[in-house]
Image: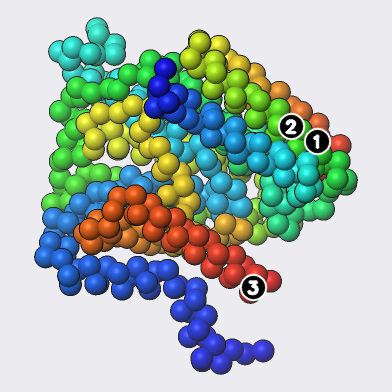
């Protein structure tokens, strides 16, 4: 039965309710605060978005296959610590490897990505070959990575980074921060993988109906391992970016970011029930989430109350997502 | 040893312990396999047995996370070795359970 225009408008409003409310909140904040709509603030928001977008794009792959990745936060911490220990100044008193010269920044980013990807491969193996549900497998990996991070750093915060590393956060190209460029590149690569490769098609097929995908000849197990490996590599990169921005790191870096990323994906339109989601969904979700946080700060909302507000937004977004799924069925 | 230090060092294993106990009990008492498998998955060969086994495995892992939370303060190497071994055991037992009662 064809929907009337009124029904279509109603569905649009319900399905995009969170984004519309956020948009109104941002406009209101902009009108009531002097410094909200400024280029500096915009750049600040984009900087904060950059590492979160990289995480969300990694998690989006897992969510599209009706999975999740709770180990993201710990992997980010590990990535940040690996990057930190390899990029400390030689004259820094608390240097982790006292006699080691700092490595090249790009090489370090690749090392952090590769190590995290190795853990992601193990997670993927547990999910694909041992049939362990994603949330249990990633929960277990979260603990392992956390423990290894504690052993690796001795629970000591890292600092004293070389200028080349902190420049990743401070430096600019064409007036835009390097961190933002990294996020743009990752978004383009992810878009290409999601839309232009066989792996991307397999991913959506698995999310839609894993049994049908298997019958149709989709290498479900290999694809799942690749998805979790790719996601973990992105967390490693996000850890590298966060370390550069903060100028220090510890195993606690990235704590709770996995929940924010899953929430951002859901707000943007990546379905937690699997099979649906685009790169633009993750970008919209991260932007909305970041704008909400900044707007609440500008409106002078108490820091603790901000958590409540964010929690309510996540709850509503997921409820609406499930409503969409039920309506579709 | 202060509460802050305990939460800082062992907060994550303790949180995971609570999550595992919650799902473990939910599986054992309510037999709610959808809680861990998700909705609209292939039907199981024996849903009740699956729920019972999965619940026990989750409680086993809850115990492992609690042990890790304690071992962190004694010997971090032992804590990590313990959780790795328990994760592998969980994986192998889960695979067996899935082959027997799963889809």
Task: Give the distance between the C-alpha atoms of the residues marked 3 and 2, in whole angstroms.
Answer: 35 Å
- Judge left or right: residue B98 versus residue B80: right
Judged from the image, the secondary structure of the residue bearing numbered disc 1 is helix
What residue is pinned by disc 3?
A328
Label 1 crowding class (10 Å Cα cut-off): few <14, some 14-19, many 20+?
Answer: many
Contact check, label 1 and label 2, Cβ < 8 Å? yes
Q: Is residue A92 above or below residue B3?
A: above
Name the image quarter holding the C terminus of chain A: bottom right
Residue at x 50%, y 36% (from the top left corner)? A71
Residue sitting at the far front: B2
Name the image quarter holding the N terminus of chain A: bottom right
Name the one closer to the observer, A214 or A9. A9
What residue is pinned by disc 2?
B57
Name the one closer to the observer, A214 or A17. A17
Task: Give the distance between the C-alpha atoms of the residues marked 1 and 2, in whole angstroms.
Answer: 6 Å
Label 2 crowding class (10 Å Cα cut-off): few <14, some 14-19, many 20+?
Answer: many
Contact check, label 1 and label 3, Cβ < 8 Å? no
Q: Examine the image and state in which quarter residue A41 appears.
A: bottom left
Residue at x 72%, y 45% (from the top left corner)? B26
What residue is pinned by disc 1?
B53
Question: Label 3 marks which chain's residue?
Answer: A
- Judge left or right: residue B7 versus residue A287: right
- Judge left or right: residue A308 versus residue B81: left
Name the one closer to the observer, A178 or B2. B2
Question: Label 1 marks which chain's residue?
Answer: B
Picture coordinates of residue A183, whole percent (x, y): 32, 48
Judged from the image, the secondary structure of the residue bearing numbered disc 3 is helix
């Amino acid at each position: 039965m064809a929907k009337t225009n009124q029904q279509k408008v109603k569905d649009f409003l319900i399905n995009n309710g969170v984004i519309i409310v956020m948009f109104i909140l941002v406009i209101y904040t902009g009108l009531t605060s002097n410094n909200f709509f400024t280029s500096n603030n915009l750049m600040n928001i984009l900087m904060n978005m950059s590492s979160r977008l990289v995480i969300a794009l990694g998690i989006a792959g897992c969510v599209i296959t009706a999975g999740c990745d709770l180990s993201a936060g710990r992997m980010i911490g590990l990535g940040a610590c690996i990057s930190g220990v390899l990029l400390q100044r030689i004259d820094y008193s608390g240097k982790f490897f006292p006699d080691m010269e700092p490595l090249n920044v790009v090489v370090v980013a690749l090392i952090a990505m590769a190590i995290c990807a190795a853990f992601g491969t193990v997670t993927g193996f547990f999910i694909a070959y041992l049939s362990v549900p994603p949330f249990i497998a990633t929960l277990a990996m979260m603990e392992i990575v956390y423990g290894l991070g504690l052993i690796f750093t001795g629970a000591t915060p890292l600092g004293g980074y070389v200028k080349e590393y902190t420049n990743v956060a401070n430096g600019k190209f064409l007036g835009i921060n390097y961190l933002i460029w990294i996020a743009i590149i990752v978004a383009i690569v992810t878009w290409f993988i999601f839309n232009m490769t066989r792996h991307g098609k397999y991913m959506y097929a698995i999310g839609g109906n894993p049994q049908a995908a298997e019958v149709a000849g989709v290498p479900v197990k290999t694809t799942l391992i690749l998805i979790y490996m790719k996601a973990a590599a992105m967390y490693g990169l996000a850890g590298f970016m966060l370390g550069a921005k903060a100028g220090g790191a510890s195993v606690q870096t990235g704590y709770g970011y996995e929940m924010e990323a899953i929430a951002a994906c859901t707000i943007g339109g990546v379905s937690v029930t699997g099979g649906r989601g685009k790169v633009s969904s993750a970008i919209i979700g991260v932007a909305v989430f970041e704008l909400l946080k900044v707007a609440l700060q500008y409106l002078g909302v108490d820091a603790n109350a901000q958590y409540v507000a964010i929690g309510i937004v996540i709850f509503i977004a997921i409820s609406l997502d499930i409503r969409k799924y039920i309506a579709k069925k | 040893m202060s509460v802050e230090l305990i939460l800082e060092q062992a907060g994550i294993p303790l949180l995971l312990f609570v999550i595992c106990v919650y799902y473990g009990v939910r599986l054992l008492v309510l037999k709610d396999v959808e809680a861990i498998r998700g909705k609209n998955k292939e039907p199981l060969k024996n849903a009740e047995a699956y729920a019972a086994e999965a619940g026990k495995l989750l409680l086993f892992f809850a115990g492992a996370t609690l042990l890790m939370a304690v071992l962190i303060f004694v010997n971090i190497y032992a804590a990590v070795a313990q959780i790795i071994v328990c994760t592998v055991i969980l994986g192998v037992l889960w695979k067996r359970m899935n082959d027997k009662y799963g889809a």
